[in-house]
Amino acid sequence: MIRGRCFDLRVEDIILSGLLFFWLLYLFLRPRIHLMPLFKVIGIYISIVVLTTGIAVMRFDLSLPRAFFYFLKELEYFLIFLLVANWVRSYSDLKFAGNAILTVGFVNVVWVGYQLLTRSRGSLFLIEAPAGVYQPLHLLESYGPGLIGEVSPLSVGGFFLLIFLLALSYTLVSRPGFRRQVYGLLSATFLVCVLLSGSRASTIGAIIGALVFVRYWGNKKSVVIMGLGFPLLLGTVLWRKSNVFYSMEHIFNFKHYVVSLAFRQQEIWQPLVYYISKNPLLGFGRSSLGFFPGFPEEAHNHYLKVLLEHGIFGLIAFLWLLTVVILLSRRVHKRSKASISKVIGGASLAAIVALSVGALIQDVFKPVILNELWWIFVGLTAAAYRIESRSITEKNNV
C-alpha cells in the first residue's frame, strides 16, 4: 500500500492468481508449456525493465513499492498472454474465445445503451476509496459512457476499438449472407461506442485498423468502407441533431485536435524530452512518470514514456516486441487455412497497427482493461499459429 494513494485490486487479479495456481499444479502432473515465438523478446524486455527500475530505486530514490506494483501489473499482461496461448489448443477453442469476446462486448453495449437512455455516466460496479485516500477522478466519471467496470475514456474507447476490429474481421471472413450481416451490424455498433467514448486516440485507431483491412482485403474494400463510414455518418448526424451524444464534440471538432496537440507539444513532450536527456540510456525506472517533481502524470506518447522510464535500450526492446507481434499476426492472417485463424490474425494485426499509431498521442499500452484484452488477442494469435503449424505437420506425416 502506497501511503495516501488508492490500491486497486481488480477481480481479474484474483481470477488470474487462481488460474496460475491450478496451472502450476497441472504442470507438475504433466510438464508441458509452449513458450511461443514472443517468449525471447518478452524476456529481454522484462529484464531491461527490472534492471533500469532497480538502478533507479538505488540511484534516484524511486519508491520501491510503487515501482513493484506498476511492474507487477505489466507482468500480469504477459501472464494473460502465456495462459491464453497455452490453454487454447484447437479451432473450437479459438471459436469459443472469439464468440466470448464478442458477447462481452455486446453486454457492455447494452450498458452503454442504458446510460444513453437514462442520461447517466459511470460504471455499474464502483467501490469508492476511504476518505482521505487519493483516487483518480477518471475512475469515477468521464465525459462519455462507461463500461460495466470502468469509465476512463481511453479504456472505454480502446476496449470497443479492439472488439470492433474483431467483429469487422469476422465480417470480412464470413461468406455473404445472414451471418455476415450480423457481424457487420455488430462491428458498426461497436464503432459507434468507440465514438461515444470521446477518445480521439481510439477513433483514429479505428480508422487506421480499418485501413489495414482495406490493405489486406482488397476485394472487399466496399465492406470495410461501409462498415466504417456508416457509423461515422450516423454519429455525425445525430451529434448535429441531438445532445444525446454528449461526448462526440471531442471527436468531430477539428479545433480540439489542434489545441490538444499544441498543448501536448508545449506542456508535456518538451519537458519530457528535457528530462530524458538527463539519463537517456537507462531512464528513471518504472512508475517514475508522475513520481519525481516536474514529471507529468501521463506522457500522452507511449514511446516517450518508455524512453523516459527505461532509456534507449528499453525503447528498442519495446519496439522489437511490437514488431514481433506484427509479424506473427501478419503470418497467421496470410498463411492460415482455417477461417477462424484468419479472423484472429487479421484482428490482431489491425489492432497492433492501430495501437502503435495511437501510442504517438496517448499512453495506449497503459490502461488495464484495454491491455488485458489486447494480450488476450496476442495469446489467441500465438495459439492459432501453433494450431496451424501442428495441422500442417500432421498433414505432411500422413
Image (cartoon, rainbow, N blue to C red):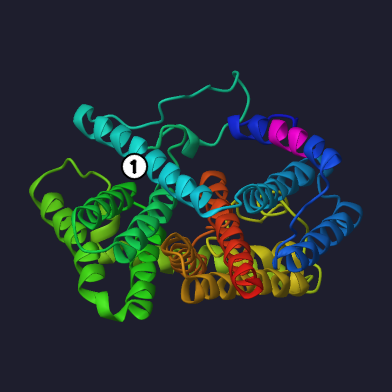
Q: Is residue 239 above or below residue 47?
A: above
User: 226 or 34, which is in the foreground?
Assistant: 34
Residue 323 shown in magenta: no
Q: Residue furthest left?
A: 241
Q: Is residue 185 above or below residue 30?
A: below
Lateral position of residue 129 relative to residue 157, left or right: right
Residue at (62% x, 71% y) in the render: 398
Task: Name the dominant secondary structure of the magenta segment.
Answer: helix
Q: Residue furthest right?
A: 58
Q: Position of residue 105 (x, y in %)?
A: 38, 42
Q: Amino acid at mark 1?
A: Tyr
Q: Residues within 10 Å of mark 1 (few under 14, many from 20)?
A: some
Q: Point out the image quarter for the N terminus.
A: top right
User: 374 or 314, which is in the foreground?
Assistant: 374
Lateral position of residue 368 relative to residue 73, left or right: left
Quadrant in which residue 100 is drawn: top left
Residue at (67% x, 36% y) in the render: 16
Q: Position of residue 43 (x, y in %)?
A: 79, 62
Quadrant in which residue 363 is drawn: bottom right
Q: Position of residue 201 (x, y in %)?
A: 41, 61
Stretch in magenta: 17-23
User: 219 or 299, which is in the foreground?
Assistant: 219
Q: Residue furthest top?
A: 131
The residue labelled by disc 1 is 143
Count of all numbered marks drawn on residues in the image: 1
- In the rendered image, is residue 7 in sight? no
Q: Is residue 21 above or below residue 290?
A: above
